[in-house]
């Protein structure tokens, strides 16, 4: 009884797998038809449905990667091609997968990964001229990329050095401007002080001159008054003397 049960289980399992495989293959053909008509989005949908029935299908996985590539979904295409690494496939299919993976990395400008992918493809299929050409081309692009990165790095260093020197020069200029400004302020302050001192000196000199001129007038007035007093005293004496003489003359008479 158990033997018959196991046989039926195996039968239905095989039948289910067969139906799934047939359905997957049918969806694969629809995907290929859409791909040929350049309806890459439709092709992607058919390939994904095909993989739901048979996720180990090399053709569905491989063609899905190609459909994604055609739609410029390069990161998704890389993921699809990488999934093929877990499948048990022959060297030819592996080489084709690495080749298309290299093409995808080229679109992403990840030239180092592209070179590695093409190299793996050549190790599996050394006679593939297309892969050899792509490998050489990717190597040149990688060398140019590295050289550009090196030049950019040197340019950035040079620019940073120039900016640093410029900042130092600007700082020196600012310091010099500050010094010049301070010196000018000090000079203006000295000039102002000198002007104030000279003004004060002139005022004092003028006041001295005015004072000197004032004393001279005062002295002159005193001298005039003294002269007048002396004059009056002399006149008094002369008058008294004259009067005395007159009296004397009168007495003699």
Image (spheres, helix red, strand yellow):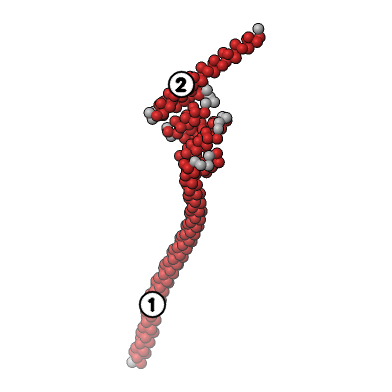
The answer to whether residue 148 is left or right of residue 253 is right
Kindly report which numbered mark, 2 or 1, lies closer to the viewer in this rendering: 2
Q: Tell which of 117 and 121 is nearer to you.
A: 121
Image coordinates of residue 186 in percent, x first then y, are 47, 63
Against 76, residue 5 (above or below) is: above
Visible residue check, residue 236: no
Q: Residue at x 49, y 27 (%)?
A: 60
| Residue corresponding to mark 1 | 220
- Near mark 1 (Cα within 10 A), the count class, few <14, some 14-19 or many ≥20, is few
Determine whether 22 is above or below 128 in the image: above
Q: Residue 102: image x %, image y %?
A: 50, 39
Numbered tag placed on residue 86 in the rendering: none
Point 43% across, 69% down: residue = 198
Q: Count every numbered label the image shows and give the total.
A: 2
Tell me where residue 181 appears, x and y as whole percent. 46, 60
Q: Are marks 2 and 1 in contact (CB under 8 Å)?
A: no
Q: Secondary structure at mark 2?
A: helix
As measured in the structure, the alpha-carbon distance from the residue carrying label 2 to the one carrying label 1 is 144 Å
Q: Residue furthest right?
A: 2
Viewer-nearest residue: 246 or 166? 166
Question: As rendered, which of 183 and 221 lies closer to the eye?
Answer: 183
Image quadrant in which the N terminus is located: top right
Mark 1, secondary structure of its residue: helix
User: Compared with residue 179, is residue 60 higher up or lower down, i.e. above or below?
Assistant: above
Q: Quadrant of the C terminus?
A: bottom left
Q: Which residue is mark 2?
A: 26
Q: Going from the N terminus, do you reach mark 2 or mark 1 first?
A: 2
Residue at the extreme top? 1
């Amino acid at each position: 009884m158990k033997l018959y049960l196991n046989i039926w289980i195996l039968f239905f399992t095989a039948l289910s797998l067969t139906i799934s495989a047939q359905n997957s293959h049918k969806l694969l053909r629809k995907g290929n038809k859409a791909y040929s008509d350049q309806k890459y989005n439709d092709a992607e949908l058919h390939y994904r449905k095909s993989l739901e029935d048979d996720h180990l299908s090399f053709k569905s996985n491989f063609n899905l990667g190609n459909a994604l590539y055609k739609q410029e979904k390069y990161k998704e295409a890389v993921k699809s091609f990488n999934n093929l690494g877990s499948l048990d496939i022959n060297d030819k299919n592996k080489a084709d997968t690495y080749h298309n993976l290299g093409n995808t990395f080229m679109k992403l400008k990840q030239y180092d990964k592209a070179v590695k992918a093409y190299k793996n493809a050549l190790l599996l299929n050394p006679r593939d001229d297309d892969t050899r050409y792509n490998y050489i081309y990717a190597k040149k692009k990688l060398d140019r990329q590295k050289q550009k990165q090196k030049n950019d790095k040197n340019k950035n260093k040079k620019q940073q050095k120039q900016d640093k020197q410029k900042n130092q020069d600007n700082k020196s200029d600012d310091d010099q401007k500050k010094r010049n400004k301070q010196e000018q302020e000090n000079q203006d302050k000295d000039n102002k002080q000198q002007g104030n001192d000279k003004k004060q000196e002139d005022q004092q000199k003028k006041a001295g001159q005015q004072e000197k001129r004032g004393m001279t007038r005062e002295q002159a007035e005193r001298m005039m008054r003294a002269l007048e007093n002396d004059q009056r005293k002399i006149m008094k004496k002369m008058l008294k003397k004259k009067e005395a003489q007159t009296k004397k003359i009168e007495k003699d008479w």
